[in-house]
Amino acid sequence: MEREETMLKRWRPRKNPDGSYDLVCKLVARDETTSQLTVPIPEEYHELLEREYFITHPPDEEDES
């Protein structure tokens, strides 16, 4: 995000094998360079993710389009 005109292209939560969660963000710069940023999601939101997100998005779903 340090580059000028960097935009968030897409984001999604990811469930890790150890039961923790990350927020995965795809970033794209003006020159079409893409990068990925991964941020841990605090444990207090894990139950909410299971109940509201992963009920319709399986944890192993890797839609990278």
Image (cartoon, helix red, strand yellow):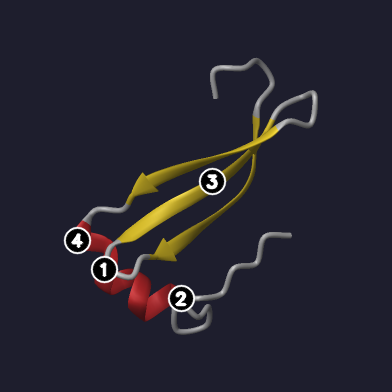
- What residue is at 62 percent from the left and 17 percent from the top? 3
Image point 80% across, 24% down: which residue? 31
**Residue that carries the numbered disc 4 in the rendered image:** 44
Q: Nearer the viewer, mark 3 or mark 1?
A: 1
Mark 2 residue type: Pro
Residue type, numbered disc 1 = Asp
**Up-down: is 37 above or below 29?**
below
Q: Label 3 vs label 4: CA separation?
A: 20 Å
Q: Quick one: SS at disc 1?
A: loop
Residue closest to the far right: 31
Instruction: Kindly state the secondary structure of the residue where label 2 is placed.
Output: loop
Q: In the image as oriented, which residue stretches furthest toward the bottom?
A: 55
Write down the residue under mark 1.
18
The residue wearing badge 2 is: 59
Q: Residues within 10 Å of mark 3 (few under 14, many from 20)?
A: some
In the image, residue 31 above or below residue 36:
above
- Label 1 near label 3: C-beta < 8 Å? no
Q: Is residue 23 above or below residue 59?
A: above
Residue 38, quarter of picture: top left
Q: Amino acid at mark 4?
A: Glu
Identify residue type, mark 3.
Answer: Cys
User: In the picture, which quadrant includes the N terminus?
Assistant: top right
Q: Earlier in the sequence, mark 3 or mark 4?
A: 3
**Marks 1 and 4 close (CB-CB < 8 Å):** no
Nearer the observer: mark 4 or 2; the answer is: 2
Give the labeled residue for mark 3: 25
Q: Residues within 10 Å of mark 4 (few under 14, many from 20)?
A: few
Residue 25: % across, % down: 54, 46
Q: Nearer the viewer, mark 3 or mark 4?
A: 3
